[in-house]
Amino acid sequence: MRTHVTRTVRLLAVLAVGAASAGAAAGCGTTGTDRGAAQPRSIESTSQGTRARQVADAWDGSKAAQEWHEGFHPLGEMVQLPEGGLRGEADKRAWDIGNFDLTGKLPGIEPGSGRVAWESGSSLAAPLLQADQAYRALDHAGGPGPGLTVTSARLGDMKVSTGRGPATVPAWLFTLDGYDSPLKRAAVNPSRLPASPIEPLGQDVPTDVLAPLGGLAETAQDGRSLTVVATHGSCDDGPAVKALETNGSVVLSASTTGSEDGPCTSELRGEKVPVELDRPLGERIVLDAFTGRPVPYGEWPVTAQSRS
């Protein structure tokens, strides 16, 4: 069943190669394929497979891959709901649209570094976000309707799944009115992505051959499957995603299906697509065949205060 994305896709439409322009063309009759036609050809038998192999070869064993493995790159949520989840449709709706109310005063901290720590014993310093910065990343609706009420916050920590295994990261723990456990939001941002060793594709590539991904939405606990946000246009039947697995990476190739000729709007839609892997992801890098870059995860970064 097709699942359209609301909350997740707001952060995922910006790609290093300018996916906004790709959205204007997505599914807009660039190939003349009739709606209801056969699904995309196998990745091994099309230019998808060639591009995926090029991306894998460029990254596997590269300096960029080494830099990526040394950074903090989440594969799991940077925001964790109270234990047991949200109660009631109003609270769930408030979360979906990002509508919060603040009744208490948020604490401040001296600008400085937090520390991301892995179970292996390695760690990484990262600038700490202020509580109000983390809160603004949650409260982005700013309008009428149901809201989650924040009464206080304190600095603590949380566990986050990363490309280097589980990590303990500093987090703001927001007390919600009516809940016994806090909502947690990581108090550090992901590391900057390294420069890609391969150039992105141009925007003239037909989307039924290859299209940019929106982002990584979920990684299964056992690492055997991923859920990605794949983008598509207003007059196609949706996206399909194939995976090329190597020892160092998983390269995902997205395409649209069932596009047809005729007028289309420039609307870019995001749809969650599950991808099954042959073996657990482990510490392999998830790459986008179109952009040649790691598939992003999470929400729009907020800016931490610089160290004084």
Image (tube, grey):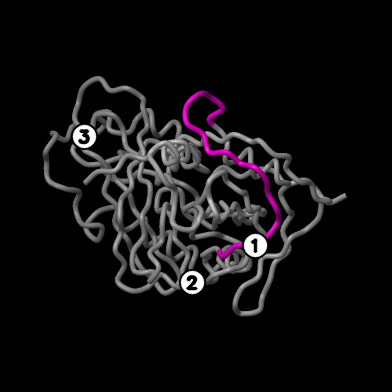
The mark lying in front, picked from 2 and 1, is 1
Q: Is mark 3 on a helix, strand or loop?
A: loop
Q: Is mark 2 on a helix, strand or loop?
A: loop
Q: Which residue is label 2 attached to? A: 283
Q: Which mark is residue 157?
A: 1
Residue at (59% x, 34% y) in the render? 101
| Horizontal relation, residue 228 to residue 237: left or right | right
Residue at (44% x, 57% y) in the render? 84
The mark lying in front, picked from 3 and 2, is 2
Residue placed farthest to the top in the image?
263
Residue 168 drawn at (x, y percent) = 62, 67
Q: Which residue is label 3 attached to? A: 259
Q: Is residue 156 magenta?
A: yes
Q: How far apart are marks 2 and 1 (CA)?
A: 23 Å
Q: Is residue 212 magenta?
A: no
Rate crowding at label 2 as few (under 14), some (14 to 19) or many (20 or more) other CA atoms within 10 Å. Answer: some
- Whichever of labels 3 and 2 marks the residue nearer the N terminus, that label is 3
* Residue segment shown in magenta: 141-159
Residue 207 or 276: which is nearer the viewer? Answer: 276
| Horizontal relation, residue 16 to residue 213: left or right | right
